[in-house]
Image (tube, helix red, strand yellow):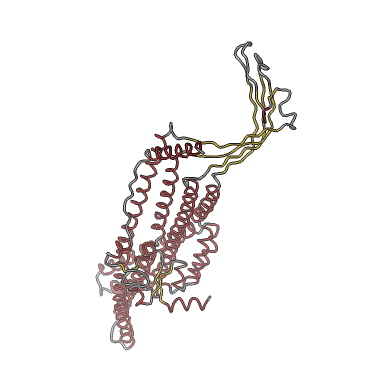
Amino acid sequence: MKAKKIILISWLLLITGCSSYVPETHEDLIQTRNDIQSQDNFTQDEDGDLKNQNLVFVHEKWWSNYNDPDLDKLMEVALNSNADLKAAKLNIRAATTAIDAADHSAFQMGLYAGADVLGTSESYTKSKAIPGPMGTTILPEDALAGETAYTAGAGIKANYHFDFYDKYENLTKQQKYLAESAKFHSKLIELNITTNIAKLYGHYIYTQDEKINLDKKLAILMSVEDRVRSRVELGGGAEEDLLIIQNKILTLKRYINLNEFQRQWTAETIYSLSSYKNKNQVEKILKDAADSHLMEQKFIIPDKISSDVIINRPDVQYYLMMIKSQKAKLKSLKSDFYPQVSIGGDLGYRGVGIDNSFKDFSSLMWSFGPRVYLPIFNLSGIKANYKIADIRVNVFIANYNKTINNSIQDINTKLSSAKTSKTNYINLDRIEQNEKIIYKNSNLKFKIGAISEYQNLKDQYIYLNSSLHKTQQAYKLYSDQIDLINSLGGVYKNQNQIETENEKI
């Protein structure tokens, strides 16, 4: 009983002594929801101010908000074939598999086999007896004096480390958080891919609409050129008037060529993101999208953004998981300052002599017992690893705070840009409607002979200019919407939209 007390007191003193070697750690503060809510464009949460607007934030399949079947098909092809997204999903599988490895790292078991040659430097060197199990003797004293001995062994060996300081538990937690971070990294890649695809798809539709408008304007200028040339030939006009029209035609053709290049470039980029092996399928989708009303779909731009949106952004959650993972690693490294206790043994065959090794397996030997490891001579290395892990915690906290700051700035910028684009689109839509009425009246005047054909063509050209400006602003608004979606990580929908989508399902 007295011996047990001595052992227990010695153990406690040893642990206390080791704990004095653990360096102090410092953890920086991370930004919270309250810090985000203090910004002008952010509100408390989904149940706060946004409740009055009957809005719900949706992360998954945000592109369904545009109700465009061709866009849905394009997204399906891209998500199933993009190489970056496949690599990200493989990383998730690898990180998940590592959880089991960390969970069972305290126990080690395996087969072994080996052989040794034991010799002496002088023939008269004496040898001690080689003991065997249960008090037996394998070789008596001086049996191998001056001789070379051969030993061989094979068997199974196992070792279990007691997790008194939660070392292996924290290693498992570390891997779990790393697996979660891999999932959020994959979501970030998916968000970037889908928003890029959506912008490219919208740009392709825009270039088609732009080409139609430019071709109509070119036809008008060609008609005007014919009439101006006729007047010049008849002496009723100046040559400069013809040259001005021809320069406008050449400038317009330059825009048409640029439009063709942009349409081809857009298609090639979509092929790349969705894998060239799906080129025929993507070509068909883009061809079918010629009659798309994508730019006419209504999009909700909220006045304020919930602080939860930033907290749940994939990049923010990624760094949050990395912080938790590094903290778990730091806790596991702290256990290295304390004595490590394990228990293990082996069961196998031992053969002595070159003629006996691996021949007679009827004789088995075994060993079993505890082991204690004291980190006395490796404290400098343990301290260095611990300090590095502590520094890396604060590195991830700094990246987390930086991501929060960048997110606030990004959302504020994108939200403001989307609101401005919406206002500009409304104004240009009114201008286009007014020009449409003017052109309609011009047709009536031309029909009754109140104005010349030249004036009528001029009014049509002005209307087409106005229509093109509206189309350009429509794409600008759409592009800003996608940028806002990318910064938010999803879209706001009202309850009616969600109910309608659920009915379709």
Q: State the residue at coordinates (65%, 13%).
A: 146
Who is closer to the viewer here, 7 or 438?
7
Q: Position of residue 381 (x, y in %)?
A: 41, 35
User: Is 118 placed left or right of 228 in the picture?
Assistant: right
Who is closer to the viewer here, 363 or 354?
363
Q: Is residue 497 visible?
A: yes
Who is closer to the viewer here, 339 or 397?
339
Q: How many marks?
A: 0
Q: Is residue 500 above or below residue 448?
A: above
| Residue 159 occupies quadrant | top right
Q: Position of residue 199 (x, y in %)?
A: 41, 64
Q: Position of residue 300 (x, y in %)?
A: 37, 73
| Residue 240 occupies quadrant | bottom left
Q: Is residue 375 above or below residue 299?
A: above
Q: Position of residue 98 (x, y in %)?
A: 53, 49
Q: State the residue at coordinates (68%, 22%).
A: 139
Looking at this view, name the residue that lies furthest to the front: 2
Q: Is residue 222 visible?
A: no
| Residue 158 occupies quadrant | top right
